[in-house]
Structures are given as C-alpha cells and as structure tokens.
Image (tube, rainbow, N blue to C red):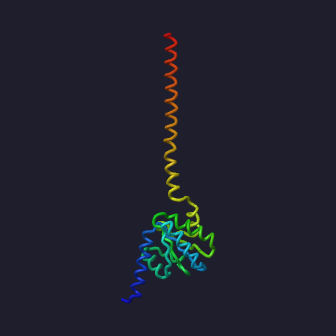
C-alpha cells in the first residue's frame, strides 16, 4: 500500500474518531482569513479545549459516511476546517460565533451536536446559551431555592414558638409574684 494512501486512511480514521468523541463538531470555511487571524482563532479555540483541524472534504465525507452522517456532506464544500468540542458542546459555537462577528471572512457552515446535524442558525442559538458552568449553577440554585425557603419558614416558626414560650413564662412569673 502506498504511503499516500496510508496517510489518507489515517486522516479518515482521525476524523471519524473525532466525530465520534466530540459532543459538538462545527464545520467552517476559513477562506479569506490571514495567517495571523487563523492563529488567533486557533489560540482562542485551544483556550476552550477545542480542537480545530483543516480537512480535505473528500476524506471528511468518507469518515462521515462510515458513521452514517451522510447529511454532513452539505457542509463539506470549499476550504473546510472542523472545530471539535469534546468537553463542552457550547464552547466551539461560542468561540466561532464571536470570531465570525469580528472577522466576517469566517463562515460557519453547519455541524453536529451530539450526533445530530445542526445548521448555522442553531449554532448561533447554541452560542447564545450560557456556559455549562453557569447552567449548572442555575440548576443548583433552582434546587436550593425551595430548601432555603423551607429553612426560612422553619426558622420563623421556631422564632414565634420561642416568643410564645417567653410570653407564657413572663405571664406565669407575673401571676406567681
């Protein structure tokens, strides 16, 4: 087998593995960005633990077909790079959307969210979501709120009970005096 063929098979395997492991994979067209802008984008993505890889469309298409993701072919035209979010599915959408606002040359074509095809509009909506940590804090706050209210009500009842006992004690002291 030729070295070139082995290299292509290795790329297909890597793309396939990344697509399987990623919670989100966003396909972009980076045409028109200069080296400094791409470097800046890669740095911003890396800071969020997002892998950004330039891929050949035919090899990405082969990997997608092997996973039953033929619908991804629609986004595999022109120069293509894929951002893989392995930990936080919102992270690649946030970074890419912000970058696309600053540099209109970056085009978000579409992608995958937990194995489902998503279009650019859904990616923008995903980018508008709060971060995973903020969402978890909101959920924790929602769970804690009833307990906090219960503790406050219980404390109020105890205060009234103690006040009543004090009043009864004072009344008995007056009666016995």
Name the outermost residue toward the bottom.
2
User: Residue 20 sits in which quadrant?
Assistant: bottom left
Q: State the image coordinates of residue 161 (x, y, percent, origin top left).
A: 49, 26
Taking depth in this image into account, of 73 and 18 the one nearest to the observer is 18
Indicate whether 51 appears above or below 174.
below
Name the outermost residue toward the left.
1
Taking depth in this image into account, of 48 and 22 the one nearest to the observer is 48
- Look at 63% across and 73% down and name the residue there: 104
Taking depth in this image into account, of 167 and 112 the one nearest to the observer is 167
Indicate whether 156 appears above or below 27.
above
Q: State the image coordinates of residue 70 (x, y, percent, origin top left).
A: 48, 76
- Look at 52% across and 15% down and name the residue there: 171
Left or right, residue 3 beside residue 37? left
How many numbered circles does the render carry? 0
Q: Quadrant of the N terminus?
A: bottom left
Q: State the image coordinates of residue 73 (x, y, percent, origin top left).
A: 51, 77
- Look at 55% across and 81% down and name the residue there: 79
Q: State the image coordinates of residue 134 (x, y, percent, origin top left).
A: 53, 55
- Look at 51% across and 29% down and name the residue there: 159
Indicate whether 102 appears above or below 138.
below
Name the outermost residue toward the front.
36
């Amino acid at each position: 087998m030729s070295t070139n063929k082995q290299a292509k098979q290795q790329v297909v395997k890597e793309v396939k593995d990344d697509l399987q492991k990623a919670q989100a994979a966003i396909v972009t067209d980076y045409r028109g960005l200069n080296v400094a802008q791409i470097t800046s984008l890669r740095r911003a993505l890396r800071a969020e633990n997002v892998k950004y890889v330039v891929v050949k469309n035919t090899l990405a298409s082969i990997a997608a077909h092997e996973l039953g993701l033929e619908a991804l072919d629609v986004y595999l035209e022109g120069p293509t790079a894929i951002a893989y979010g392995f930990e936080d599915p919102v992270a690649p959408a946030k970074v890419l959307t912000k970058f696309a606002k600053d540099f209109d040359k970056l085009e978000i074509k579409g992608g995958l969210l937990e194995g489902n095809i998503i279009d650019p509009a859904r990616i923008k909506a995903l980018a508008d979501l709060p971060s995973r940590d903020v969402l978890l804090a909101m959920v924790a706050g929602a769970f804690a709120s009833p307990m906090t209210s219960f503790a406050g009500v219980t404390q109020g009842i105890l205060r009234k009970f103690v006040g009543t006992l004090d009043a009864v004690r004072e009344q008995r002291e007056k009666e016995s005096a």
